[in-house]
């Protein structure tokens, strides 16, 4: 995980974790998660809260420890990075930046690709 998150990010995530960990015991419980989420004007059911915990709770003890929280954040950041890479790849095809890839844009890209390939010519090919 050290190669995914910077030290600065880890410090920021520790501050966020401590915000969730209301009693300071090093774990986020369903109740603590509910308090924070309700402060954001959301009202999830007990089952939805438990599902959130279970998604992250690697050791199955019913709470989220800081290491589990870091793993979740690293995973979310990787997903965001992958999404950005995909958007950038899309923009390569979408020359007019209208949010769609037209047939002419695909043809243009294929033409450029073919023109930029260097085939080694050899008499053995003929």
Image (tube, rainbow, N blue to C red):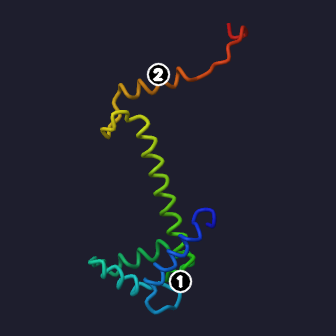
Q: Say above or below: 38 vs 102.
A: below
Image quarter where the N terminus lies is: bottom right
108 sits left or right of 78 in the view:
left
Question: Dot 2 surroundings within 10 Å: few (below 14), some, or many (20 or more)?
Answer: few
The residue lying at 30 percent from left, 81 percent from top is 38
Residue 16 lies, in percent from the top left, at 46, 78
Residue 4 lies, in percent from the top left, at 59, 62
Question: Dot 1 surroundings within 10 Å: few (below 14), some, or many (20 or more)?
Answer: few
Name the quadrant containing residue 3.
bottom right
Residue 70 lies, in percent from the top left, at 54, 72
On the image, numbered disc 2 is attached to which residue? 111
Helix, strand or loop at mark 2: helix
- Front tag of 2 and 1: 2
The residue lying at 45 percent from left, 27 percent from top is 109
Q: Residue furthest right?
A: 124
Q: Say above or below: 80 vs 119.
A: below
Image quarter where the C terminus lies is: top right
Residue 66 lies, in percent from the top left, at 54, 79
Name the quadrant containing residue 94.
top left
Q: Residue furthest front?
A: 8
Helix, strand or loop at mark 1: loop
Number of marks in the rendered image: 2
10 sits left or right of 35 in the view:
right
86 sits left or right of 117 in the view:
left
Q: Which mark is residue 77?
A: none
Q: Of marks 2 and 1, which one's residue comes earlier in the chain? A: 1
The residue lying at 46 percent from left, 86 percent from top is 21
Q: Are marks 2 and 1 in contact (CB under 8 Å)?
A: no
On the image, numbered disc 1 is attached to which residue? 61
Q: Cα distance, mark 2 to mark 1?
A: 57 Å
The residue lying at 52 percent from left, 91 percent from top is 25
């Amino acid at each position: 995980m050290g190669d995914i998150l910077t030290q600065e990010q880890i410090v920021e995530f520790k501050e966020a974790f401590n915000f969730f960990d209301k009693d300071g015991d090093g774990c986020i419980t369903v109740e603590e998660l509910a308090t924070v989420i309700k402060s954001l004007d959301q009202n999830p059911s007990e089952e939805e809260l438990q599902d959130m915990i279970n998604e992250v709770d690697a050791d199955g003890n019913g709470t989220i420890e800081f290491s589990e929280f870091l793993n979740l954040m690293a995973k979310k950041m990787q997903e965001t990075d992958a999404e950005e890479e995909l958007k950038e790849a899309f923009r390569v095809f979408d020359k007019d930046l209208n949010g769609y890839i037209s047939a002419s844009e695909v043809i243009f890209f294929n033409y450029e690709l073919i023109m930029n390939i260097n085939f080694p010519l050899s008499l053995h090919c003929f």
